[in-house]
Image (spheres, helix red, strand yellow):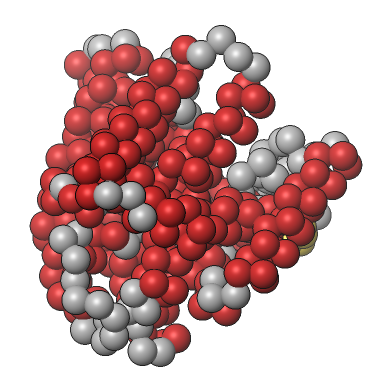
Amino acid sequence: MGLLRTLLALSVVFDHAWPDGAVLVGGQIAVQCFYIMSGFLISYILVERRSYASLRAFYINRYLRLYPIYFVVAILSLVAILATHRTGFEGVYEAAPIGAIILLIFANATLFGMDWVMFFGVRHHRLVFVTNFADSDVPLFQGQIIHPAWTLGVELTFYLVAPFVLPRRRLICLLLILSVVLRLYFVDLGFGTHDPWTYRFFPTELALFLFGALAHQVLLPVCKEFSSRGQILGANSGTLFLILLCTVYSLIPVDEIYKRVFLLLAFGCVVPLAFLFQLRHRFDGWIGNLSYPIYICHTLVLWICTFILKYIGVADQRVLAILCAVLSIAFAICLNWLVGAPFESIRSRWRSRGQPAERVGAKTDI
């Protein structure tokens, strides 16, 4: 699972650094696969391991997983933005009404509501709900310090409802069906196939999170019934299958909608095997821990790489994408070492119940 998580993070990097090149699965599908894995892992720590003695412990632990690294990268990004006088960012705060400015400051400072920024706009100097974030007098999304951080708002909402939903399998199934029906309804209305409704709206993306939770609660026990040799073979084969599928996805000559549905279904069904692979291989967990810092730092790295290549006169988009990926990995290693590791010891204090740490221990957390 760790290899897959980092591969998906790099899919987002290439999608932003090389938007005209078909590389891996692309940013949107990568994010939705993350939702599935998040549902699987949160169900694992809440329902199977029961790692937390209270809701407070769970919420604090999850927030400490996301916020410290985000905060460091956000500060560095804000310094870069102000040092270079990025007109788009500064223009938002100069032109937006006070309500929009409060929303942006609160979201940037806390992560809560980051996703909802994508559903608001400005018309006649008033903050209003819009079906297209580009349909606004002031592009509020440009006021986000780290643009991809909107997914963290969605994740935090998953965490908010998870303790009340995941222990109840019938409720999981009911909400999953309602989420799918809502998506189909939006598609029928005509805007469900357009950004931001395709993968940014929490109520419709909830189905993917719950699909991952069901994969843990229904499929993982089946996989664990295999013999030790069967588990090893299945874990290795399943992980290799998903890695190959993600790698060659853009080359498969099938209509995009069918490929996407197949990939998401395959991910949900096979992710228990990838999880068993991670339990048996410590390096897989270490690699997976790079996925979040890669994701959150890559826009800053992309800006730096663009500046450097422009300064030396290199305009090749492929060079930019590869350089951005390599430096994002290096930056992610530093973030985990300098920020993630110290806070991991703090997070461990909030895990007060459950089985003793397994081989991957905290590395099963996203």
Q: Quadrant of the C terminus?
A: bottom left
Residue 242 visible in image: yes
In this view, 8 is above or below 127: above
Residue found at the very far right of the displayed protein: 189
Q: Is residue 13 left or right of residue 103?
A: left
In this view, 13 is above or below 135: above
Q: Nearer the viewer, residue 131 or 164?
A: 164
Residue found at the very far front of the displayed protein: 227
Query: Which residue does the image show at 81% across and 39% down from the upper left?
Result: 187
Task: Report x, y in % for residue 215.
Answer: 49, 54
Task: Report x, y in % for residue 43.
Answer: 45, 66
Splitting the image into 4 quarters, where does residue 224 fall?
Answer: bottom left
Q: Quadrant of the N terminus?
A: top left
Residue 76 visible in image: no
What is the number of callouts on the image? Answer: 0
Task: Report x, y in % for residue 263.
Answer: 53, 32
Task: Report x, y in % for residue 225.
Answer: 36, 55
Query: Which residue does the image show at 29% across and 60% down from the upper left?
Result: 364
